[in-house]
Amino acid sequence: MKKISILLILGGFFILAGGVQAASLGEQVNFYVDSDYDATGRSQLSATLQTIGQNIYFYVEDDYWQLLNKANQNKLKGILENLADEFDQVIYPKERAVFGSEWNPGIDNDKRITVLVTQLVKNAGGYINTYDEYPQSQIPNSNQREMIYLNTLSIADANNKAYLAHEFQHLITFYQKTVLYGLEEEVWLNEARSEYAPTVCGYNDVYSGSYLASRVDTFLDEPSDSLTEWKNKSSDYGAASLFLHYLADHYGQEILTRMILNNQVGLASIEQALADLEHPETFSDVFANWAIANYLNDCQISPGNKYCYLNAHLTYQRLHVDYSASYSGFPNLIVSRSSSVKDWAPYWYQFRQGTPQATDRDTLKLEFNGSTSQGDFQVPYIVFDQDYQPAVQFISLDNQQQGTIYIPNFTSQNKSVVLIPINQYKKSGFGGNEPTSLFSFTASSVAATPPIVNGLSPNSGPVNGGLAITVQGENLSSVSRIIFGQAEITDFDIIDDQTITFIAPAHSAGPVDITLFNSDGEQNSLASAFTYLNVYPEGSLVRARGDYRVYIVKDGYRRWIQSAEIFNAYGHLRWENVIEISLEELNNYQEAWLIRADNDSRVYEVNADGTKHWLNMTAEEFVISGHFWEMVYIVNSFERDFYRTGFDVLFQ
């Protein structure tokens, strides 16, 4: 897709080319074409209108048409008629529902878009030329139409609908960003949305031979290709496609709508869309999770399924990357490597033992050093235990882009580690030849002396603090100081060499690091060790993003309101007051299933099948059996009677 910026009209106003008459079948038109994409380097050709749909014209290059015999001409007309129907019935309504409208009636004052089927270079499925959206008074070789060019070589391809869907998204983006806001979308994100367009239209529902399947193959050939640098290589499309599929599957297609309709481009448009939908993650968070998911692709590892693809076709068997380099031979091996990386291009470095052995140097020490010149690194890493169960953590880097982690029992328990350095320095203005930034790492086996943090339990809690935190690790008996987020913990208990406890202070929402210091000044950190979660007022209505279930919260508990009838039976409840929260925030509330009606002393246990069961026991038996009075919600008689009566629950 060609882009121009110097000819954008100031203030977002575009000049229309003037009124036109609707085209008729058999009409011959001279078109300008891009010589870079034309099969023989032409810049102009003639074509004839062969098919008219409700929202689309199909012109076929005359030179190509005349090469076909009558049977193949009829075959091509049949293909175009099917494509026109598919565009009108599927592509046009579905893409507009997600991405918004193209410029309509646009530069030519005609509601139909124009498709020119012409002979292009072999590796081009199609393109659009934004020159065509300007009047010839500004761009002499403009065709003055909302126009798509498709390759004759692929017009009969099984994925021809996907190619058309891909290019139509570009027309929509031009209107939504350039015409309405005078902006030029970043190429990588424009292409990423177009890569997702076939999925919007349902063309990847059958995976074998699909457009998506081909992109997975190209991605796996070069998974460390920068997402944001655009050289127009097949690997660029693979990365763009897979990132957008991850993003849309985890945050819903609404995020695509928000990002294209807002007045930002590139990363900023995604960050704005995330904020508008009240997601706490930044683009950096999403990208890191995607990089981890590309290696693990396992929905069982993290709450919220962060480290996997949710698309049923994108399973681990079909999609997971291998390590970029692997190092083994510890404890006798010392690895020191320097390399360079482009922004938003992950690499996966594996360190493994291979065979467990006893050694006094049983801790793997990993030191990371990123460049401070155009360097802003985030370094997630995955630790696999002796049963190959993974745990995801992040290296805490200082302002010099340096950080160190220790992996205890690495050699004796045959652990392995995957390091994923990501540079995220540049945020906008990406092109086809982005600079690189240097980084280095050193891996060695040591006899551990600094405190080592393996994890916190629990690893999330309310912003008002007060939660008892247990730190699990190694060499903790020598800890003299703890920094937790922005606070210093002055009151903590050292239980033993592997355990410390303290009470979490109040803190703003979001992830925090923990850093432990010993009396010798040695320190170790665990990035994003704990996440502070928002606390919502008593009686708030909440639901997890992507889930239909609405809960009412109080006293640290949540109760599922099982039907719209129950919800509407409470006059003070309003659907517009339902707050969408993260799954992690929802899980911060314990689920309650006990109710009683006002003026009724009987307490019922409500099941998900819509039945209620009277807890036929004394108050003392209620407490002895592990119930808490705080879990009992007072409901109206309508809700109590709404549930079917089941067997009593008896004290045993």
Image (cartoon, grey):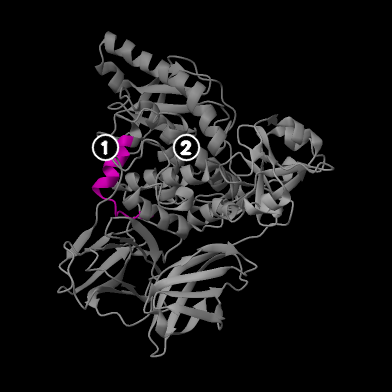
Reply above or below: 263 against 203.
below
Magenta stretch contains residue 388:
no
Spot occupied by residue 384 in the image (x, y as percentages of width and height): 30, 59
Q: Is residue 497 above or below residue 346?
A: below
From this viewpoint, is residue 102 visible? no
Amino acid found under the numbered disc labelled 1: Asn
Indicate whether residue 217 is drawn in magenta: yes
Q: Residue at x 46, y 59 (%)?
A: 285
| Side of 277 relative to 384 (left or right) | right
Q: Which residues are magenta?
A: 213-229
Q: Amino acid at mark 2?
A: Gln
Q: Residue furthest right?
A: 599
Which badge, 1 or 2, is on the more N-terminal residue?
1
Q: Which residue is mark 2?
A: 169
Number of numbered discs on residues? 2
Residue 281 versus residue 508: which sits nearer the camera?
508
Locate the C terminus by quadrant: top right
